[in-house]
């Protein structure tokens, strides 16, 4: 994992907070403290363009059973290593 990815994940809550912090009495602009960081645009894109839309209740999601074979394959290969 690169430094940019690490910092994006570490600060993710403050970036996602743009969408709900105000409902908790917190600053929805908390992400601004990271302005100027080389990973800021990545964290902003992740929170706003990818993560936020994952909360759409009308999105046609597949049931968990759809993913079971893949999960078993991944964890089975880890166990065999």
Image (cartoon, helix red, strand yellow):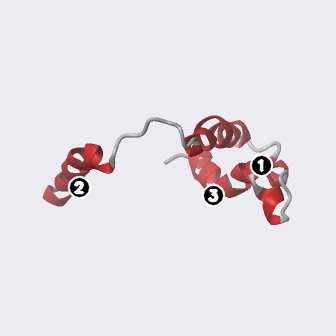
**Image location (x, y in percent) of residue 64:** 32, 49
Task: Say above or below: 59 vs 2.
Answer: above
**Image location (x, y in percent) of residue 25:** 85, 65
Identify the residue shown where x is 72% and y is 49%: 15
Identify the residue shown where x is 76% and y is 44%: 37
- Relative depth, front residue between 37 and 10: 10
Q: Secondary structure at mark 1?
A: helix
Q: What is the distance, in whole Å, between disc 2 and disc 3 at their CAs?
A: 25 Å
**Image location (x, y in percent) of residue 68:** 24, 49
Q: Given contact means CB atoms under 8 Å apart, are the residues at marks 2 and 1 in contact?
A: no
- The image's mark for residue 10 is 3
Q: What is the distance, in whole Å, between disc 2 and disc 1 at their CAs?
A: 35 Å
- The image's mark for residue 75 is 2
- Relative depth, front residue between 13 and 41: 13
Identify the residue shown where x is 60% and y is 53%: 9
- The image's mark for residue 18 is 1
- Relative depth, front residue between 28 and 1: 28
Q: Residues within 10 Å of mark 3 (few under 14, many from 20)?
A: few
Q: What is the distance, in whole Å, between disc 3 and disc 1 at their CAs?
A: 16 Å
> Closer to the observer: label 2 or label 1?
1
């Amino acid at each position: 994992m690169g430094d940019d990815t690490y910092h994006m994940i570490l600060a993710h809550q403050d970036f996602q907070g743009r969408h709900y912090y105000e409902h908790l009495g917190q600053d929805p602009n908390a992400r601004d403290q990271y302005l100027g960081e080389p990973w800021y645009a990545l964290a902003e894109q992740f929170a706003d363009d990818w993560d936020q839309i994952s909360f759409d209740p009308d999105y046609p999601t597949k049931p968990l059973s759809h993913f079971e074979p893949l999960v078993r394959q991944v964890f089975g290969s880890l166990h065999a290593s």
